[in-house]
Amino acid sequence: LGLGRQVVIVTGAASGIGAAIARMLSGEGVGGLVLTDRDATGLQRIGQELGVALPVETVVADLSDSLAPSAIALAATTRFGRIDGMVNAAGLTTRGSFETGTAEIWDSRFAVNARAGFLLMQAAIADMRQRGAGGAIVNILSMNAHCGIPELAIYASSKGAMLTLTKNVSMEHDPPLL
């Protein structure tokens, strides 16, 4: 993968897909990881596990808080001086259909599954532009972004929003950000 000294942010890193990606990046020789999750115990565990092999910064953050993405980006640039890549793996899957969904479920799914990813991409792009450097952003989506099952209408909509954002960031910033 040629990750060399790259610094990568991984959201949802305490478990599941995020933890698996963090382990994979560590195994590929990334230069530093910024791991974030709202699960402080799980985040501490993976931070200690991976911190044996490489520099790791952990940031306990609830991505439903609109200030969390800037705090995560600041932690990356403070510790490592840059953001070279990002994996938006965090996501909430609370059920919510047209019959059972609420405004609160809608707002919380979109805050974590779409808004946080947008704000994190925005911060990473700003850092890359400031340094005149390229980078990579990976957004973990779901097949539900294309057609959700009824009880996942809200989740599917939030992943559909992230799909559109992913296409947009690719179109706007490929070729590289230079």
Image (cartoon, rainbow, N blue to C red):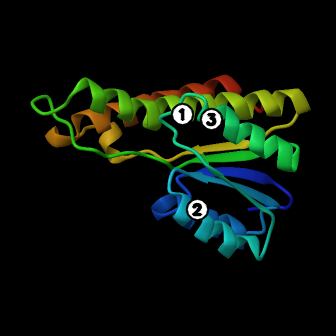
From the top left corner, tell me how far across and down residue 156 is, in percent: 30, 37
Residue beneath the point at 81% across and 32% down:
127
Q: Is residue 147 left or right of residue 129?
A: left
Q: Is residue 153 left or right of residue 128?
A: left
Which residue lies under the disc numbered 3? 69
Examine the rendered structure and indicate whether residue 135 appears above or below residue 108: below
- From the viewer's side, name the closer residue of 135 and 79: 79
Q: CA distance from mark 1 to mark 2?
A: 18 Å
Name the amino acid type tagged 1: Ala
Which residue appears farthest toward the front when viewing the image? 41
- In contact (CB < 8 Å): disc 1 and disc 3: yes
Residue beneath the point at 51% across and 50% down:
38
Sequence order check, earlier mark of 1 and 2? 2
Name the amino acid type tagged 3: Pro
Q: Residues within 10 Å of mark 2 (few under 14, many from 20)?
A: many
Residue beneath the point at 38% across and 45% down:
92
Q: Residues within 10 Å of mark 3 (few under 14, many from 20)?
A: many
